[in-house]
Amino acid sequence: GIKAPAVKPAVAAPVAAAAAPEGGEAVLSPVPGLILRLLVSDGAQIEANQDVLVLEAMKMEIPVKSPCAGTVSLAVASGDKVNTGETLFTIA
């Protein structure tokens, strides 16, 4: 059979969409809990879907991932208590 050539431009679009928006992307706490540990340092270059920190809520560990690639600015420290909707970190 005849194989259609791979379409390259369609692959580039989702990669561009994964970059941080203008002004940065804030990541909010999904639940009230405790910052158990930070997995990246402040100012680190991170990839989309990378684990940034681990929250503990009701004895469960909840990894919080980056929504996009960029430079992380941490708004919390290990041991901090956070409420739902509180900014954990920003990606710029």
Image: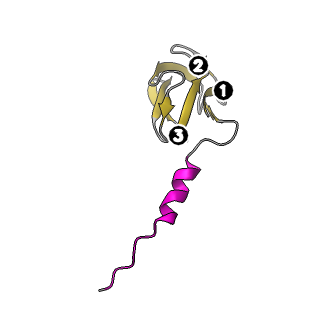
User: Is 9 inside the magenta-drawn segment?
Assistant: yes
Q: Distance between the Cα atoms at labels 1 and 3?
A: 21 Å
Q: Quadrant of the N terminus?
A: bottom left
Q: Nearer the viewer, mark 2 or mark 3?
A: 3
- Asked if labels 1 and 2 touch by Cβ distance under 8 angstroms, the answer is yes
Q: Nearer the viewer, mark 1 or mark 3?
A: 3
Which residue is labeled 3 in the image? 69
- Asked if labels 3 and 1 touch by Cβ distance under 8 angstroms, the answer is no
Does residue 51 appear to the left or right of 43 in the view shown? left
What residue is drawn where x is 45% and y is 37%?
Answer: 50
* SS category of the residue bearing label 3: loop
Which residue is labeled 1 in the image? 86
The foreground one among 13 and 36 is 13
Q: Distance between the Cα atoms at labels 2 and 1?
A: 10 Å
Looking at numbered disc 3 in the image, what kind of residue is underneath it? Ala
Q: Quadrant of residue 6?
A: bottom left
* Crowd class of label 2 (few under 14; some 14 to 19; many from 20; radius 10 Å): some
Which residue is labeled 2 in the image? 76
State the image coordinates of residue 48 (x, y, percent, origin top left).
Answer: 49, 42
Looking at numbered disc 1 in the image, what kind of residue is underneath it? Glu
Q: Nearer the viewer, mark 2 or mark 1?
A: 2
Which colouring convention does the figure follow?
Answer: secondary structure
* Crowd class of label 1 (few under 14; some 14 to 19; many from 20; radius 10 Å): some
**Rendered position, 6 above or below 30:** below
What residue is drawn where x is 58% and y is 19%?
Answer: 76
Q: Distance between the Cα atoms at labels 2 and 3?
A: 19 Å
Residue lying farthest to the right in this orientation: 23
Magenta residues, start to end: 2-18
What residue is drawn where x is 55% and y is 15%?
Answer: 77
Q: Quadrant of the C terminus?
A: top right
